[in-house]
Image (cartoon, coloured by chain):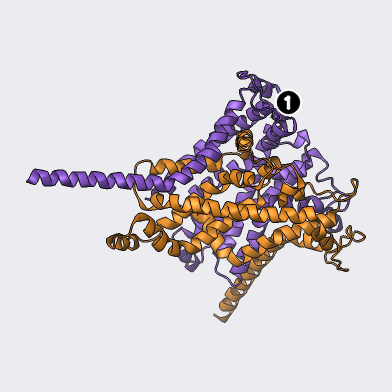
Amino acid sequence: MIRAENKWKYKRLIKDLIFVMICIVVAVICLFPFYWAIVSSLRDSAHIFSTELWPTQISFSNYKEVISDKTFLCSFWNSAIIATMTALISLFVCLFASYPLARHQFHGRKRVLMLALSVTTLPQVAVLSGMFELIRILDIYNEKSALILSYMIITVPFTLWTMTNFMNSIPKDIEEAAIMDGASQSTILIKVFLPILSPAIVTTGLLAFIAAWNEFLFALTFTLTNQARTVPVALALFSGASQHEVPYGLIMAASVLVTLPLVILVVIFQRRIISGLTAGSVKG
Amino acid sequence: MFNIMKNNNSENILKKSHREWLSNWGFLAPCLFVLILCAGWPLLKTIYFSFTDAELDNLNDFCFIGIDNFVDLARDQDWWIAVRNTFIITIIAVPLETIFGMIIALILHRNFKGRGWMRAIVLIPWTIPTIVSARMWAWMLNDVYGIINEILINIGLINEPIPWIASNTLSILSIILVDVWKTTPYMALLLLAGLQSLPQDCFEAAEVDSIPFRKTFFRIIIPLMKPTIIVAMIFRGLETFKIFDLVYILSSGNTATATMSTFARKHLVDYADVGFGSAAATSLLFFILILAIFWIPFNKKRLKKLD
């Protein structure tokens, strides 16, 4: 009897051990590239090619150089403005649109949802030349508004679906009580739904922000000068002072600076981000 | 008397439904306007351009040349290389993502201390901007100074450094590797959502009966999860088909490792050949449409859930 119990305990221990091992392997694979970028960024140009797994001589020279680089700072600023504006505008537009989609049955409702869904499958390249002409007609080439406008195609369909899902999950009686009190549609939306939905709005806005912050193809195509570039483009075209030598230390320092805000946001909001990602996407 | 009342009533209903119609579409209008302006119009314009000889520096002055661009495209060796590369990347990357995503989903589904941390850690590759991932991996895979070669040599798996990015075949492999690394978290979340919507008591029952996990996995989880897995795979397939950023950085304009997206952009922007580039983009759209036809029916379910 005791033996059997011991055996069971032993088996359990081995199972737990295997589980922990798998967790560690997964964590190392997920984190190592970012860790290695941090380690490399802390090495000065004399030690950059060292392959020791931890930094022996920590040097902040790369960071100093990146931060004193005006064009890089400028692109950082551009990205921040563009991503914030994109998130705010798509939230504003979709908040109104998701209200009838989630709360009312009407003719054409399904069509609108399917339309938004089909837009998510569009490759960015497929709208590139048309978008280029649109931007040229509006005369906003090489400006922030060009990127904000073009990012709508990425963020709006997704935001619309996520917001509709969130709004759909609010119980019906809340709305009915407000209607009984004689509240109008817009009052219901602003006074009743907006406060309930504020966590969902933060989540969706965050996802739109990340999407806009990371976007590359439009940013590469619709900007021309260093002053107008966003961070991903600046990073892709980063080539340092000399033409022959790729400044890996600098690139890694810039990469870490660009990613750190996002990593912090994700660690803080991980639970919400996951609920947002799955609410707006495939769920069996 | 009765008649009048009835009339009044129906008029009221009519008025009410009219008002409702107006408010519904009024709320939808800004969103629809944005979608038409930023997606509909540019898309139609691109398809239109693909039948013309338009050039980037002069988009007003062009001729309609029928399907010439598509004929040229079909004859272009480089285009077919791009098509082949896109297919190879999608066909290898998506199943790998599904397998690894499933493993991570199963880990996150379990209740254990530190699950919150594990969730955050797993999300990190997805958060890192693609360009940053590409540059980080390019540095790690560098043939002379890269840490990956160094580790492999130290373990004794290889004798001399492998040119991960310099060689064409290997650079496709590297692109797949980085893509799998980057998008597996997202796949894991999709699968996790599916796992959580399964009836949880069957897991418990299996555990109580001490059925080995292998059996539970293949006999219960996989059959029940099949629709979720298929939808997630098609969804990821659609995304992988559009792959651009990683290829742009990791193959630096090489025709042998181009994909459909990089091919289209190169002709559109670098060679300023809007007509031909648009034809390539439209062809990519055609491939996507075929995939999307399989995907859309699955979304009917999602629509139903919103009723």
Report the side of B235 relative to B28 (left or right): right
Looking at the rendering, which quadrant does residue B172 occupy?
top right
Q: Is residue A145 visible?
A: yes
Q: Say if residue B213 shows up in the picture.
A: no
State which quadrant residue B190 falls in: bottom right
| Chain that is orange in the image | A
Q: How crowded is mark 1: few (under 14 residues within 10 Å), some or many (20 or more)?
A: few
Which residue shows up at 64% across the image and 52% down it?
A82
Report the residue at 33% width, 56% height from top: A184
Q: Is residue A169 left or right of residue B291?
A: left
Looking at the rendered structure, the secondary structure element under dot 1 is helix
Q: Residue A214, position in %: x, y?
A: 66, 51
Quadrant showing the N terminus of chain A: bottom right
User: Where is mark 1, residue-wise?
Assistant: B77
At a point 34% along the width and 63% down the height, the residue shown is A174
In the image, residue B44 lies at what x, y percent? 55, 31
Amino acid marked by disc 1: Gln
Which chain: purple? B
Compared with B184, B263 (above or below) is above
